[in-house]
Amino acid sequence: MQTSKNPADQRREASNVVDAAAADAAIKQIAAQINNDKVVMLGSQRVNVLAVLQKVNEDISFLNARINTIEKMKTPNSVMLSTYREMLLSRESVRDWLSLQ
């Protein structure tokens, strides 16, 4: 003969079912997102190309702004300007490479 469960146990079991269903839905959503995003393998890591591309574009915007600011100075720091230009070229190369992926 089966005994009936107390209300607290019934609520806990119902909560576990809801939590499991929510977790399953979240996992499916993440898996779909991973499948839709471009991903490259770097070593043993999966890297989201779109996220990196967005960050690189932000860096490029920042570097362009800094270069423009330095160029407008009465006595621009040539070492700093050269460094920022080299960094800009590097970021642009990374952006171009990522765009091909």
Image (cartoon, rainbow, N blue to C red):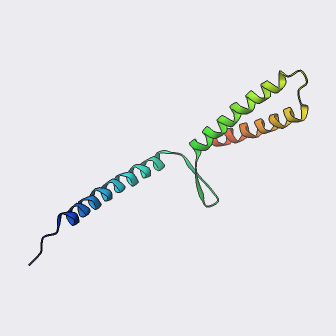
- Which residue is depicted at the point 67% across and 42% down? 97
| Pick the front one: 25 or 66 | 66
| Pick the front one: 81 or 4 | 4
40 w.r.t. 86: above or below? below
For residue 55, side relative to residue 85 (left or right)? left
- Which residue is depicted at the point 58% across and 43% down? 51
- Which residue is depicted at the point 36% across and 56% down? 23
For residue 4, side relative to residue 8 (left or right)? left
Q: Position of residue 72 (x, y in %)?
A: 83, 21
Q: Quadrant of residue 4?
A: bottom left
- Which residue is depicted at the point 64% across and 59% down? 43
Q: Position of residue 40 (x, y in %)?
A: 59, 51
Q: Locate the N terminus by quadrant.
A: bottom left
51 w.r.t. 28: above or below? above
Return the residue found at the far left: 1
Q: Quadrant of residue 64?
A: top right
| Pick the front one: 89 or 80 | 80
How many tags in the picture?
0
Return the residue found at the far bottom: 1
Q: Position of residue 84 (x, y in %)?
A: 81, 35
Q: Locate the C terminus by quadrant.
A: top right
Q: Quadrant of residue 49?
A: top right
For residue 35, side relative to residue 4 (left or right)? right
